[in-house]
């Protein structure tokens, strides 16, 4: 299964953090990990992921319910269909994921592009730089995005 990811900025604790979001506009198709939920009912699995992500309300968690033919997500119908086909192939009743939109422009006041994201990362204070570096270095090996690759090249010269 391949999904598309882009840099997303969100606030957690008291500092700005980085996370990957599913996007087709600026993303890179990458292989992803998946795991079976310990919950038998979709509602409980959705609540569990929402809680782990620190989200409240119904938004922020996407799903494809193959059995009941229900779908909720901000991603395109094409990508939702791709996820549904993958679920059927794997004989999975439902697929859930963190369904956040990019808020780069909202947080940084400039549109997302690789150059702007790199500029943001290069100008972080020491604590935020270390957090961003740790996050990017801990991303799974197969998560190879253009931004990650450029950032890793930058780190080679910085360190």
Image (spheres, rainbow, N blue to C red):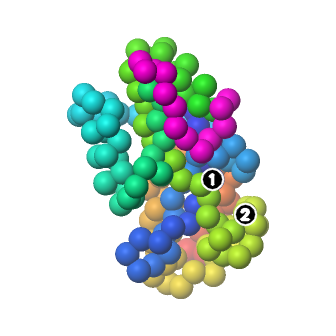
Side of 153 relative to 52 (left or right): right
Residue in the picture at 49% in, 14% down = 89
Q: Position of residue 24 (x, y in %)?
A: 69, 43
Q: Position of residue 33 (x, y in %)?
A: 44, 36
Mark 1 touching mark 2, by CB under 8 A?
yes
Tell me which corner region of the image, top left, top right, bottom left or bottom right, holds residue 38: top left
> Which tag, 1 or 2, sits closer to the chain's start?
1
Q: Position of residue 23 (x, y in %)?
A: 64, 46
Side of 33 relative to 144 (left or right): left
Magenta stretch bounds = 66-78
Residue in the picture at 66% in, 57% down = 147
Q: Which quadrant would the N terminus be assigned to in this image? A: top right
Tell me which corner region of the image, top left, top right, bottom left or bottom right, holds residue 123: bottom right
- State whether residue 119 appears in this view: yes
Disc 1 crowd rating (10 Å Cα; few below 14, some 14-19, many 20+) is: many
Residue in the picture at 29% in, 46% down = 48
Determine the CA span between mark 1 and mark 2.
9 Å
In the picture of the structure, the residue carrying the numbered disc 2 is 112
Q: Is residue 142 above or below residue 112?
A: above
């Amino acid at each position: 299964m391949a999904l598309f990811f882009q840099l997303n900025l969100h606030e957690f604790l008291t500092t700005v953090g980085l996370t990957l979001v599913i996007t087709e506009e600026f993303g890179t198709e990458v292989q992803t990990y998946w795991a079976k939920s310990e919950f038998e009912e979709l509602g409980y699995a959705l609540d569990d992921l929402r809680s782990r992500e620190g989200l409240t309300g119904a938004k922020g968690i996407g799903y494809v319910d193959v059995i009941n033919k229900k779908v909720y997500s901000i991603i395109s119908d094409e990508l939702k269909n791709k996820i549904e086909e993958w679920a059927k192939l794997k004989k999975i009743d439902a697929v859930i994921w963190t369904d956040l939109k990019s808020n780069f422009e909202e947080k940084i006041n400039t549109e997302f592009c690789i150059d702007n994201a790199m500029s943001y990362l290069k100008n972080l204070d020491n604590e935020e730089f270390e957090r961003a570096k740790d996050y990017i270095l801990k991303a799974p090996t197969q998560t190879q995005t253009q931004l990650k690759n450029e950032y890793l090249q930058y780190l080679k010269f910085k360190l």
